[in-house]
Amino acid sequence: MAEPLLRVAGLTKRFGGLVANNAVGLEIGPGEVHALIGPNGAGKSTLVALVAGELFADAGAIVLSGRDVTNLGAHARARNGIGRSFQITSILGSFSVQENVAIAVQAHRGHSFRFWRAAEREEALNEAASAALRKVGLMSRAAAIAATLSHGEHRLLEIAMALAGEPKLLLLDEPTSGMGPKESRSLTDLFQELRGRYGMLLVEHDMDVVFALADRITVLASGRVIASGTPREIQADAAVRAAYLGDEDVPVERRHA
Amino acid sequence: MTTPKFTLALLALIAAAAVPWLGQPYLTRLATSVLILGIAATSLNIVVGYGGLVSFGHAAFLGIGAYTVGILGLAGLHSGFLGMPAAVAAAALAAFLIGGLSLRATGVFFIMITLAFAQMLYYAVIAAVPIGGDNGLRLDPVTFGSRVSLNQQTSLYYVSLVSLVAALYLCRRLVLSRFGRVLRGIKDNERRMISLGFFAYRYKLAAFVIAGGLGGFAGALFANLDAYASPELIHWTMSGDMLVMLILGGVGTLAGPVLGAAAFQLLQEVISSYTKHWMLFFGPLLLLIVLVSNRGVLGLVFREARRDG
């Protein structure tokens, strides 16, 4: 296979005595959806933060499209093609929905040390923002102030902001958390549409979503990779069933609020 | 900008332009200091109001601007074409150095570090005998060519008025530009902005430098108003006063700092004519305004529905 989109090797992160990630390794190919599952406290969000560059690893390497980004800050990694949505909604609440996405476009088009021309009138930014909003079905809310949106709409806005940066890799930290079943299903449909175009690292508790989307699954427990493989292999894996999925026939973990 | 606001601004401008015609030197002087304070508060508003960075050391840049004019005067250089840009450049350079270090901290640490830098400068200046020490530095107001001297009260007044209008226009363009959008975004949610690919530190530093430069300009005007560069301009109370003006007028609004400067100066003038303990009355009044309106005086006037409510 060609150069993977993302290669993580031997990644270790300690918080005091706690080893949140212990020699974690995984690879994501271009356009591949890679789900990351595991019980609460397994180190999933830590791994996402390490890949995003919000945290720095104590050991190990992160390679993005053949480039070692281990020592790059979060902003530089975003410029190298990482887009993300946060576990807890993170948007610019005082901005309009349109401007939230336009600023995400702005981050990747030209520089922002321009002090004179009104940014709101830059049609190239606005058009790209509208395209991203249309993609997630939020165009009708473009003029609304972002803080006034519903929870489900916030999650969609986050996805639109991530897409607007034209990333190669999407880090999706529990994108469906707090969503109703209907919203969750339409978001899954959206990811289906996007699959193949973006590599995705998907942290998700809803096993329906995971098994619907994932090309590969990595299971974390206590900071270690205990299994990695195709959805079928993971379902069949005895260690995974014992550690995580339990003995239920249909493994669906309860969503936490 | 909505029409009633624009009309009001125009009326205010006409009224302001008419002040020297009243022929009251005391009034003109008071109005000049309001204009200059308005520029100073506007410069601080760039970092505090739009960047969300509460700098408690902004007086340092006013002082550097004033002393630049004074020191050039000592060297026999009295041209405003040299003095004013030099004041801006010196203050901007200082802002680059102070901001470069203090912006590595956030929150209350940032407040304390900016305060510490300004106070260091204050004590350095009052110890520096060649530039007057704690007596400050007498100077000749600068001249622009052979015609205009800021020694003339009316000239200084109109230069200050034009400067304030220009500063407000610049500020508005800045806030709406790509740069200003990023700055406002960082104020709203810095973590998100970083994850979008913005190196937040650089934008904050640039804002700090712009604000410092404009503060230096205001300081240079103060030096001309008093024919004197005063160490009091650097003292922390000056930084505090400017923050009070912002709160009083409305943080993060265009007209707020100017209204705040006017209200501050006039209240000080009126109350202190009755008692020297003017702060005793001013304090509760400030508290009242903050409690009644979250956008300062401007919020009281326009009663805007908050956008981010």
Image: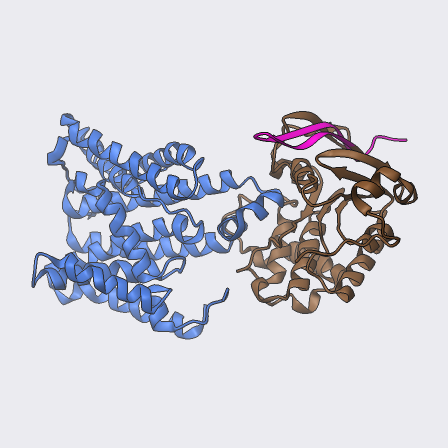
| Secondary structure, magenta segment, majority class | strand
Q: Is residue B275 left or right of residue A5?
A: left
Compared to residue B269, the image places residue A166 above or below, namely: above
Q: Which chain is brown?
A: A
Front residue of B281/A124: it is: B281
Query: Quadrant location of residue A60?
Result: top right
Compared to residue A246, the image places residue B293 above or below, namely: below
Q: Is residue B262 left or right of residue A230?
A: left
Q: What is the span of residues highlighted in magenta in the rendered image?
A: A1-25
Q: Is residue B201 visible?
A: yes
Front residue of B221/B117: it is: B117
Query: Quadrant location of residue B116?
Result: top left
Residue depicted at x 29% and y 68%: B12
Expressed as whole percent of the image width and height from the top left, the position of residue A137 reads 74, 64
| Residue A20 forms part of the magenta stretch | yes
Chain B colour in the picture: blue
Query: Quadrant location of residue B84?
Result: top left
Expressed as whole percent of the image width and height from the top left, the position of residue A157 reads 67, 58
Residue depicted at x 59% and y 55%: A91
Q: Is residue A27 visible?
A: no
Q: Is residue B14 left or right of residue A10?
A: left
